[in-house]
Image: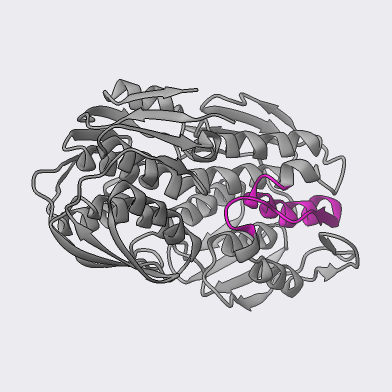
Amino acid sequence: MSTLVIEGGHRVEGRIDVEGNKNAALPLIAACLLTDEACTLTNVPRIADVEVMARLLLDLGAEVQGIGSTTLAIRCREVTKDEPDSALVGRLRGSVLLLGPLLARRGRAIVAPPGGDFPARRTIKTHLEALTAMGARVVQGSGHRLEVPDGLKPASLYLDEASVTGTETALLAAAAAPGLSEIRHAACEPHVVELCEFLRGMGVGIKGEGSPTIRVEGVARRSGATKRLYGDYIEAGSWAVVGAITGGHVEVGGTRPVDMEVVAAALTKMRAQCRQDGDVFSVEATRLIGAGRITTGLWPGFPSDLVSLVTVLATQADGATLVHDWLYELRLFALEQMSGMGADLFLCDPHRIIVTGPRKLRGKSLDSRDIRSGMALIAAALAAEGQSRVEPLETVERGYSQLVDRLQRLGASVARV
């Protein structure tokens, strides 16, 4: 286990170029199982979660080249088993995305309970209901066991929640079910759109991506495909907050203006100066003010993955900000440790926190309990006086490529120990 030692109080400024979105990379890698032809993914984020997913495919018999780089070349000529390595599955919630492709290629899938952030709070009920609607049946035993003796069948289904991975699970299964499927109450996030684009490249007919209703014309045989991932707007927003909270000026390249609107809207409410020039998003903070209220929402609402970071930024804003994350509970709990840094936080309930600023923060030892709150605590430590220690660093590195090197290139005084 590694610790990030941070000497706070230094302006963080410069340019960072983001790689692809983790939440797009995982379903795209899983989709490569749907075909026995070669697939290529570029601008892949060099993060631990992507490496785990790639190694899960290796365990299933795939040929995978480029692990640890931004280009993955994948070919699944044969899928040799229907039960991926349980130790790897236990490290990654995205491993649930293997269910549909395994049913398509093997007719059976046995997946241990997936890991990742908040595993006890995040069920896969929506995923299983989508698969059973397409002909899968649950088999008794440990973990998640499904089989489709007669193959996947097209279906018209309504998801009980607009779950991103639930929608992606339904898409992956529908792509292999010959005929027309319709998925209603689908998630609309950009990474869902990316999966639809990749499946279309495989020869699957898809209409309606980016809307709550997606129609899929599944095919019996899928071809190989190539896809360049869009720049990760969550990572871009994280670097923007890191610059703003330290009074610096950060430029983030590789972004799409349509994705960065949700980030700019929240930061602008705090009077951070945001600008989009082509694929470069820049932010500069002068005197921040409380935003009044920031509430998460389904896309194109403010993403829950950024709620921890804007909460930390609000500690340096003049006035009060109510942050309401109705999607998840534990992210806000993780920020309570900042009270020991001098932050003025009032946790109303598991979903709402009131932040009053500006407050001078003091360095402290901090616990990174999930990817996003861990990055938020790093941002707080960069703005604090004195030394902080954030651990385990590996938790944050599951979602941020070359984290220590990039922080140092921006002028942060940090070291891994």
Rendered location of residue 164, percent (x, y): 53, 61
Q: Nearer the viewer, residue 211 or 160?
A: 160
Rendered location of residue 91, percent (x, y): 67, 44
Q: Residue at x 66, y 37 (%)?
A: 52
Instruction: Say left or right for 243 vs 167.
Output: left
Count how many numbered circles sit on residues in the image: 0
Q: Residue at x 35, y 50 (%)?
A: 340
Above or below 190: residue 275? above
Residue 41 within the magenta-colored segment of the rendering: no
Instruction: Say left or right for 275 vs 328.
Output: left
- Can residue 389 be seen by looking at this rendering? yes
Residue 92 within the magenta-colored segment of the rendering: yes
Q: Nearer the viewer, residue 154 or 12?
A: 12
Above or below 256: residue 184? below
Position of the N terminus, as image quadrant, is top right
Q: Residue at x 35, y 63 (%)?
A: 300
Rendered location of residue 21, percent (x, y): 46, 43
Q: Residue at x 45, y 44 (%)?
A: 374
- Can residue 403 be seen by looking at this rendering? no
- Look at the image and give the residue range highlighted in magenta: 90-119
